Amino acid sequence: MKRLVLLSVVALLALAACAAPAAPQVTFTEPKDGATVASPVKVKWAAQNFRVEPAGAVNAGAGHLHVMVDTPCIAVGQVIVNDDTHKHYGKAQMEAELTLTPGKHTLCLQAADGAHVALTGAGMTQQITITVQ
């Protein structure tokens, strides 16, 4: 009986893990939050449960990434403009070099759909603070 109960619990846990897909998330992998770096700053990022693809087509579960420099992340549903503080990586790039002045800077990594519209979800943005020497 104990074996049957144990097998049932294991089966239910496995089923629960399969039933709830992990939420999409984008993260900086380099530099780390709080890092002191030199300019140009090599910036790298990763995506989990989110397909990074070139801008253009709007596909469910997919899009491309942007980095905001010293400006807040964009509100969900808003178009991310393309200017000196809103860097677009619409060719599906997963890294870039940023030329930054010495001092403290905030970087916001943000996922958007193929039309540059900021996507919903707690994991679709990450903000870090770095210091440039």
Image (spheres, rainbow, N blue to C red):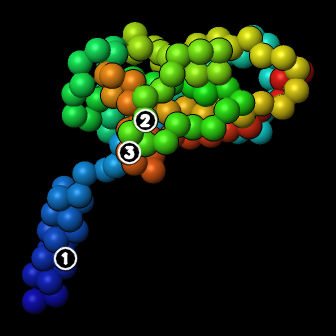
Instruction: Give the side of residue 47 with respect to residue 2, left or right.
Output: right
- First reached walking from the N terminus: tag 1 or tag 2: 1
User: As shown in the figure, which amino acid type bears the numbered disc 3?
Assistant: Thr
Q: What residue sits right under mark 3 in the picture?
A: 120
**Numbered label attached to residue 37:** none
Q: Quadrant of residue 69?
A: top right
| Residue at disc 3, secondary structure | loop
Above-or-below relation of 16 to 109: below
Q: Position of residue 99 (x, y in %)?
A: 74, 11
Expressed as whole percent of the image width and height from the top left, the position of residue 119 reads 38, 38
Q: Which residue is rendered at x = 31% and y = 22% of the image?
A: 114
What amino acid is labelled 1 in the image?
A: Val
Label 3, residues with CA under 10 Å away: few <14, some 14-19, many ≥20: some
Q: What is the spatial separation of the Cα atoms under label 3 and label 1, in whole angstroms?
A: 34 Å
Identify the mark at residue 9; answer none if there is no mark.
1
Question: Which residue is more in the foreground, 104 or 48?
Answer: 104
Mark 1 or mark 2, whichever is nearer to me: 2
Residue 16 in the image: x percent, y percent? 20, 65
**Separation of marks 2 and 3 at Cα, in angstroms:** 10 Å
Task: Quadrant for the N terminus, please.
Answer: bottom left
Residue at the spot of label 2: 78
